[in-house]
Image (spheres, helix red, strand yellow):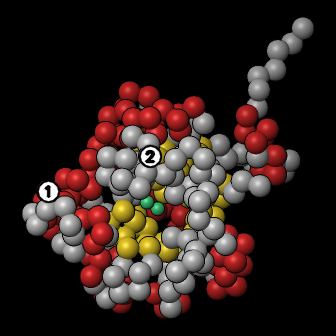
Amino acid sequence: MHHRTFDWFNHFYPSHNRKDGMVKMKYKTETHLHCEESNHCSEVPAEEMVKHYKKLGYHTLIVTPHYSRAYLGTITPDWDMRVDYLLFGYQKAKKMGKKLGINIILAIELTSNVNRCDYLIYGITEEFLRTNTGLYDIELDELVKLCKLNDFLLIQAHPFRKGHEPGELKYQMGIEVFNGRHVLDAKNNLAKKYAEANDLTQLSGTDFHDYLDHKGGIITNQEIKNIQEFKNVIRKKQYQLIIPN
Ligand SMILES: [Zn+2]
Ligand SMILES: [Zn+2]
């Protein structure tokens, strides 16, 4: 009698089963998440969200609260209190992540008032958020400059969703080629073709707001424990996209 352990990775991602001797990638990272505490468009509290992803075998979650005038501009005139609100879900997730052994990382999804498009910004810190107010109002070239200066990774979310369009290429570092929000059609096929044609960095994310959203993210060889490691694997292209059928 011999026992075989269930190989979940090759069960769910058979196309990644390498027969050429290369190491199999195995760590799952979610790149686009919203929880109820900071975004009332999400139905799921941070702690429940983390438990859910633990069950699904993810190792790292990047929490990306909406950073928009609609969310932050109306709650209080006090900028620090706005940032407290923005961070609330992330902090709860972080505590639960510690308990369950999941890495929780902070980023934001900025809605630009200039073109109404959404940008995921990876590398942003709490200190940066507190000292740079009202990022939703700055011009796109300023935003790009700021990201380059601070070594942030700038990815346009769902560029082909209704009401959105891919930004000018000179402003484009990368785009989501898979967005899993189940109530809004991201036209992911168009995004994938556009990224390939223009040689843009490609990212996949669930845009988690409730349990029905289709699970995206990336798979890597190494566990991603902080935002620097995330930026490194993206820039060196050492990742595979999770794109459900
Ligand atoms: Zn939302
Ligand atoms: Zn989102």
- Identified at 29% across, 43% down, the residue is 91
- Identified at 86% across, 47% down, the residue is 19
* Residue 68 visible, this angle: yes
Label 2, label 1: how far apart the Cα atoms are: 22 Å
User: Could you say which quadrant of the image residue 198 lies in?
Assistant: bottom right
* Residue 21 visible, this angle: no
Observer-nearest of 96 and 174: 96
User: Could you say which quadrant of the image residue 176 lies in?
Assistant: bottom right
Q: Amino acid at mark 1?
A: Met
Which numbered disc covers residue 81? 1
Badge 2: few (under 14), some or many (20 or more) residues near its Cα, within 10 Å?
some
- Image height check: is 197 above or below 58? below
Q: Earlier in the sequence, mark 2 or mark 1?
A: 2
Q: Is mark 1 within 8 Å of ligand 1?
A: no
Which numbered disc covers residue 113? none
- Identified at 36% across, 53% down, the residue is 40
Residue at the limit of the structure toward the top, as seen here:
1
- Image height check: is 151 above or below 138? above
- Point out residue 233 in the picture as x, y percentages from the top left corner: 53, 59
Q: Which residue is mark 2?
A: 43
